[in-house]
Amino acid sequence: MIGKQRLKSFQLLAYEALFRRLKKEYKDNEVFLQDYGKYYAGYLGEKRVDYTLSNFRDENIYIIKDLRLHNYNHYFQIDTLLITPYNLLILEIKNFRGELRYDSHQKQFTQHLDGKKTVYKDPIQQANTQKRNLAFWLQNFSISLPIDTLVISSNPATSIHNIQEDPQIYNQLIHSESLHFHLDRIFEEYNEKRINQFEQNKLYKLLHSHHTPHTPKLLEKYQIPLDFLITGVPCPNCTDSKMQRKKYKWLCPNCNHISPSAHKQVILDYFLLFESTITNKDCRKLLGISSSKTAYLLLKHLKLEQTGKNSARKYHAPPIHTYPQDNAIPFISKSVFI
């Protein structure tokens, strides 16, 4: 398998940034936490499938994760796309607990957990819609390749019930443990290779170059007032306590915790929640400092791309793959997703 490691998306990082910035009394927001739980569960499920894929025998397969492309007036997103010598293969990944039931007559997908029934969009139809979108997108570049789909349940504790025992569904809705078997089955259906490795690599680069990450404005989505947010540089020990800049370090007046780089996460969170650029003035307001020289040095040490000069200088957000990956939100209650 040839491809990049799956990292947290902009959207997932933005949820974690918002949780960090919310004052203590506003953190326990049920809607916000449930939405985050859904996205985080999806990320964990995709990582689990990534691991299964990494053990597959075929090395001449390019893999693209979290691909989001634009088709005229809308975007479509693919969890995982395999570029093989024979075809393109879309993997739609679900990470649910409990029992999953698929009704092939009604095209209905339901989850049964703790005595409750929840109806979700038909994942097979979702994958087929992605297939049509991808085929249409490729036409813009005069590319025509067979496209197959698989819907994968990534949670090993989940049971799948094919209500009508439809043979076709058994090959479309699968457990991640059987992924290698189904990859072999799909590839055996092709008599000859459609593209060589050079063409695979070319297509891989083309798709990556047109990937457009989803960058939601969560403060607007959840209508969160600015006074719900922590200002300045919060102490990692005291949370709501503001740190003070003292001799090139940050000092908490409450617990005496010292940090040379507490400002870094605050600035990264600004890029995730507010704007993709920041000025010296914005930085001073954000960190609660008055010295333009201090703000200049702090921004300079982050080695951010710059445009403009003097007071008009703007510092641009770094690539999303450089953001910390280990700051998940702690879950207070059980989730139906993980």
Image (tube, grey):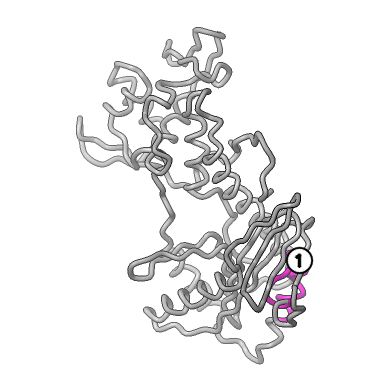
Quadrant (top left, top right, bottom left, bottom right) of the N terminus: bottom right
The residue located at (40%, 84%) in the rendering is: 142
Percent x, y of residue 160? 76, 66
Check disc 1 and report the residue beneath it: 160
Q: Which residues are magenta?
A: 170-185
Percent x, y of residue 130? 51, 72
Residue nearer the viewer, 257 or 58:
257
Regarding mark 1 in the picture, which secondary structure is present there?
strand
The residue located at (56%, 80%) in the rendering is: 147
Q: What residue type is disc 1 on?
A: Ile
Residue nearer the viewer, 17 or 116:
116
The residue located at (24%, 35%) in the rendering is: 313
Main SS of the magenta part reads helix
The residue located at (73%, 81%) in the rendering is: 166
Query: Does the magenta-highlighted stretch encompass residue 245?
Result: no
Percent x, y of residue 331? 65, 36
